[in-house]
């Protein structure tokens, strides 16, 4: 659980940001699903649920914009988004239950860069960008590489439109548990692929060496050996390093079969 001394309801992002920077112990409230995982005392909790335009999925001519307050359930059910990027729906559709997916927000998930996130892995295999109130537009991959947490507000995610085939794969011990490992792949009309792997248990990353070899025509078996060597895996309570290495090979082969 978490506690706070003050409660502030913002009507604009500017109001929310001004309140956020007043104290290092001030915190933004999204769905609060992840805040409840810890046991922390905050100074002021800032509610941004009344801020307009950050709770919508908007289709534009060359992109989709996903507001920070969009829920996982909306990602799962939005037909326009599904027509272009079904990998996003598949990444969230099996996370615990509908009640949780109605509560978890996109902005909180991406901004906190959780290593266990299925959604971040799916977004990373697409041409995705984060939009920060003060920091501007950043490529998602570059944002994930930042080690320090910004005192900023993520307002939306932008995904550039492409004609893609895609696949999301993961392994869990149970439906209500986090992924032991997850993997997402997209393939465009030129045959170029993007492969992202998360829950290693670190943050999701792109497997560049594996992507290059697949584009050169390497078969699935050879590619799976490359991804095992290329990426760094580790051990935690959900699985060992060695198990994750083997899973990466199996999930990649299964994903490649889907996009081909």
Image (tube, grey):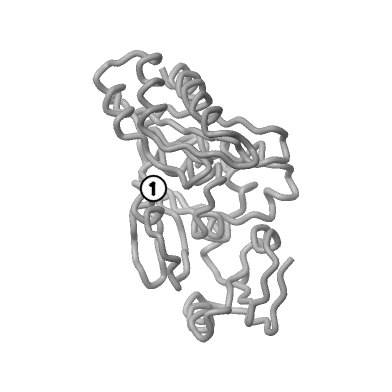
**Residue 90 seen in render:** no
Compared with residue 116, is residue 168 higher up or lower down, i.e. above or below?
Answer: above
Which residue does the numbered mark 1 point to in the structure image? 128
Q: Residue at x 31, y 22 (%)?
A: 214
In this view, the residue in front, 85 or 173, is 173
Q: Nearer the viewer, residue 165 or 168?
A: 168
Q: Residues within 10 Å of mark 1 (few under 14, many from 20)?
A: many
User: Residue 91 in the image: x percent, y percent?
Assistant: 56, 38
- The residue that appears at 53% across and 42% down in the rendered structure is 201
- Quadrant (top left/top right/bottom left/bottom right) for the N terminus: bottom right
Q: Residue furthest left?
A: 216
Rendered residue at 70%/62% (across/down): 36
Residue 61 image offset from top left, x and y in percent: 36, 47
89 lies above or below 43: above
Classify 124 as above or below 228: below
In this rendering, position of residue 31 left or right of residue 79: right
- Image position, residue 142 (x, y; %): 34, 53
Q: Which secondary structure lies at badge 1?
A: strand
Q: Is residue 47 above or below residue 141?
A: below
- Image quadrant where one finds the C terminus: top left
The image position of residue 160, as x and y in percent, is: 36, 45
Q: Quadrant of residue 175?
A: top right
């Amino acid at each position: 659980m978490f506690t706070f001394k003050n409660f502030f309801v913002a009507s604009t992002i500017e109001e929310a940001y001004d309140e956020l920077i007043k104290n290092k112990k001030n915190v933004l409230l999204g769905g609060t699903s992840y805040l409840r995982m810890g046991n922390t005392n905050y100074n002021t909790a800032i509610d941004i649920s009344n801020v307009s335009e950050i709770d919508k999925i908007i289709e534009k001519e060359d992109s989709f914009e996903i507001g920070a307050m969009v829920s996982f359930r909306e990602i799962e059910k939005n037909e326009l988004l599904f027509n272009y990027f079904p990998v996003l729906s598949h990444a969230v559709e099996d996370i615990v239950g509908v009640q949780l997916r109605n509560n978890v927000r996109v902005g909180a998930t991406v901004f906190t860069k959780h290593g266990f996130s299925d959604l971040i892995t799916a977004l990373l295999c697409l041409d995705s960008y984060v939009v920060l109130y003060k920091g501007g537009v950043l490529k998602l991959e570059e944002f994930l590489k930042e080690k320090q947490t910004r005192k900023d507000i993520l307002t939306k995610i932008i995904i550039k439109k492409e004609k893609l085939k895609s696949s999301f794969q993961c392994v869990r011990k149970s439906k209500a548990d986090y992924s032991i490992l997850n993997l997402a792949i997209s393939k465009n009309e030129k045959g170029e692929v993007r492969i992202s792997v998360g829950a290693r248990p670190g943050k999701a990353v792109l497997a560049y060496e594996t992507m290059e070899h697949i584009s050169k025509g390497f078969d699935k078996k050879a590619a799976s050996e490359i991804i095992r060597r290329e990426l760094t895996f580790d051990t935690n309570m959900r699985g060992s390093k060695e198990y994750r290495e083997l899973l990466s090979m199996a999930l990649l082969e299964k994903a490649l079969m889907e996009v081909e």
